[in-house]
Amino acid sequence: MVKKATRLARFAEAVEDQPVVVGLDVHKKTYSVALFSSQDGQVESYTCPAGEAALAAQLSGLGCSIEHIVYETGPTGFALARTLMAAGFKVSVIAASRIPRGYAAAAKNDRLDAVKLATYFARGLLHSVAIPTVEQEGYRALVRRRKRVAESRGKIKQKIKGFLLASGIGEPQSIQKWSLAASADLSALDMPPEHRMSLASMVREYLFLLSEDKMLRAEIRTATKRMHAERFAHLTSVVGVGETAASNFLAELFSPERFNRPEEVTSYLGLAPVVSQSGGSQARARIRPVGQKRLRGILIEAAWQWTWRDPEAKELYNRHFAKHGIGQKAIVAVARKLAIKLWRMAVEIPPVSMEGAARGAWSG
């Protein structure tokens, strides 16, 4: 401990007032910290126990002119970034998928990763992601949880149908559209005891997920009303955009005013076309499957609804379909247009800041 303090004191004395970039390799139990002087290239590093407030106090007491602190996205989330920002530091959380990586095999450990983050950031090679507030993160977690529950509900429906098919048991009519009578009809089916126990377990799982989905929908409505009432009403005025599409759009973008151009929005969502051309070959455009996969799928579903019910969207779809002859390309173009439309509508309404709005939703 004494040696580490001595090394850090020597580093602070050597760099004096030079700007220092701090790179962090963040884990559940430890932080690897790298200090990089962008003027003379001096580097010092150390490892410390994980602790957001303790690290903020430690960096504040180093005696260096800390210009910026960076760490990459990961399971530890944004709590560390918010703590450091509250302590007065400039912080960037770096998109892990966009950190430059060499082709050749190279040494790798936590210290080297921290050094790489600091040096790459000082050279302008890294892309940061937006840091949500606690309220924005809570709302997004709520919306994402509801989507995962809905996906699980769809899977258990398929498992029940598959089980009946494999067991040679006919499906009751009520599970074609999963009406309210479905669970009772499934329980009333004539089958061997062992089959009945397996089916009963799946039906209980289905009913649990159905109950969770209903509860989460109510929680999301409450949170949306408190945090995004005007924006939500504005977005759902678009034909084909329902509460699921609107709440997911607001949750995943969380600060739509941070985007300056439509191209930034479509790139963030993974709906921006990427043109590929080499030599005299014909240019080809495709979307790069990056960004917000959850929201992209929901927007494409909403784009179909928009196309069926809005003449402008229908004309756009037909124009792209006539050009390519591929329905998937045409609907992606419509989804891209829809995303831009929703973004522009969202930024027309100023954000509402309400202390504890998302937290209040948890209590119903």
Image (cartoon, rainbow, N blue to C red):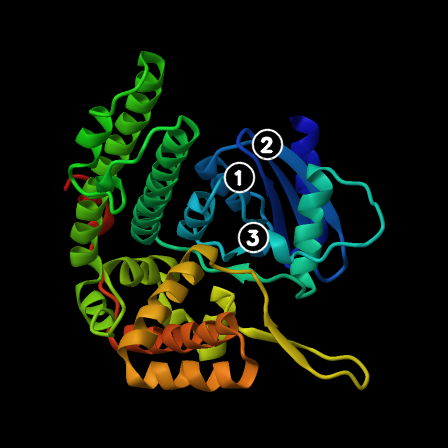
How many residues crowd mark 1 within 10 Å: few (<14), some (14–19), many (20+)? few
Q: Secondary structure at mark 1?
A: helix
The residue beneath circle 1 is 58
Q: Quadrant of residue 354?
A: bottom left
The residue beneath circle 2 is 48
Give the camera-side residue of 209 and 110.
Answer: 209
Counting residues from the N terminus, which is met first, the one under dot 3 or under dot 1? 1
Expressed as whole percent of the image width and height from the top left, the position of residue 161 reads: 36, 36
- Residue drawn at point x = 33 percent, y = 66 percent: 302
Examine the rendering and report whether any part of residue 103 can be seen: yes
* Mark 2 in CB contact with mark 1 (< 8 angstroms): yes
The residue beneath circle 3 is 69
Label for residue 143? none
Counting residues from the N terminus, which is met first, the one under dot 2 or under dot 1? 2
Select label 2 or label 1 by which is in front.
2
Expressed as whole percent of the image width and height from the top left, the position of residue 330 reads: 48, 76
Type of amino acid under label 3: Ile
- Residue drawn at point x = 24 percent, y = 63 percent: 242
Q: Is residue 5 above or below residue 120?
A: above
Residue that lies at the very extreme toward the top in this rendered image: 193
Type of amino acid under label 1: Gln
Give the camera-side residue of 45 and 140.
Answer: 140
How many residues crowd mark 2 within 10 Å: few (<14), some (14–19), many (20+)? few
How many residues crowd mark 3 within 10 Å: few (<14), some (14–19), many (20+)? many
Type of amino acid under label 2: Cys
Expressed as whole percent of the image width and height from the top left, the position of residue 279 reads: 81, 83
Select label 3 or label 1 by which is in front.
3
Give the camera-side residue of 311 and 362.
Answer: 311
Judge from the rendering whether residue 179 lies leftward or rightward of residue 320; answer left or right: left
